[in-house]
Amino acid sequence: MSYGQGSGDGGGGGGGGGLGGALFIKSGDVTVSNSTFTGSVAEGGTGGAGSAGGADGQGVGGAIFVYQGALLNSWGGVSYSGSSAQTSDADYYIMEGAEYDTTLPVVSGMFVGQVNEGDVSPATGSLSITDADADDNPSFEDVALSGDYGTLALAAGTWVYTLISQHRRLPRIGWKASC
């Protein structure tokens, strides 16, 4: 009797897949910009031998493979050179259910406000955010922040900066606080 060795002509297992020669994105968001992928290779493994013979694995997404539910943001300056994949695009492969975003969101509106010494009214403004990708609907998260001289609140794209009452008279005459 011998242990650790099989006998006979059993089946061979399948070859493993090669997914994303340089970058495999399983979950979450990844942003790539100003990057070059050179000579990335996705190559599947060789199937096992035997009477059943295992199938060779697939090489998918030469440089980048994006799995279901993940997001690849490719925002300018990304290039591919000499990448290869056995069974898909040599540069990247986006699995069904994953996302590939190539356009930066654009933020516009009033970014600067001013409160003067003695002001009781807050500085206000509004911001908007848009994205050229049809399936993207970016938005601002509502936040409230406190600083040494006042508070900044952002809600539904409208911001309000309010001086703390004890600082209505700022340290120097003519001094202005900007936000």
Image (tube, helix red, strand yellow):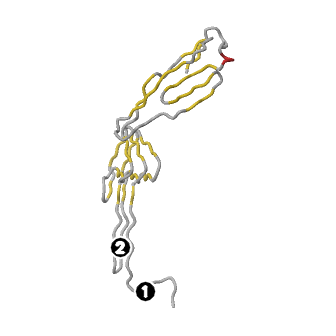
Foreground mark, 2 or 1?
A: 2
Q: Residues within 10 Å of mark 1 (few under 14, many from 20)?
A: few
Q: Quadrant of residue 138?
A: top left
Q: Residues within 10 Å of mark 2 (few under 14, many from 20)?
A: some
The image position of residue 143, as x and y in percent, is 56, 32
Q: What label sits on residue 54 in the rendered view? A: 2
The image position of residue 117, as x and y in percent, is 62, 11
Helix, strand or loop under label 2: loop
Give the residue at x 42% y 46%. Answer: 71
Q: Quadrant of residue 177?
A: top right
The image position of residue 113, as x and y in percent, is 52, 18
Residues at marks 2 and 1, CA–CA distance in whole angstroms: 18 Å
The image position of residue 172, as x and y in percent, is 65, 11
Disc 1 marks a residue whose amino acid type is Ser
Instruction: Name above or below for residue 5 compared with residue 42.
Output: below
Give the residue at x 43% y 28%. Answer: 128
Instruction: Name above or below for residue 46 compared with residue 160.
Output: below
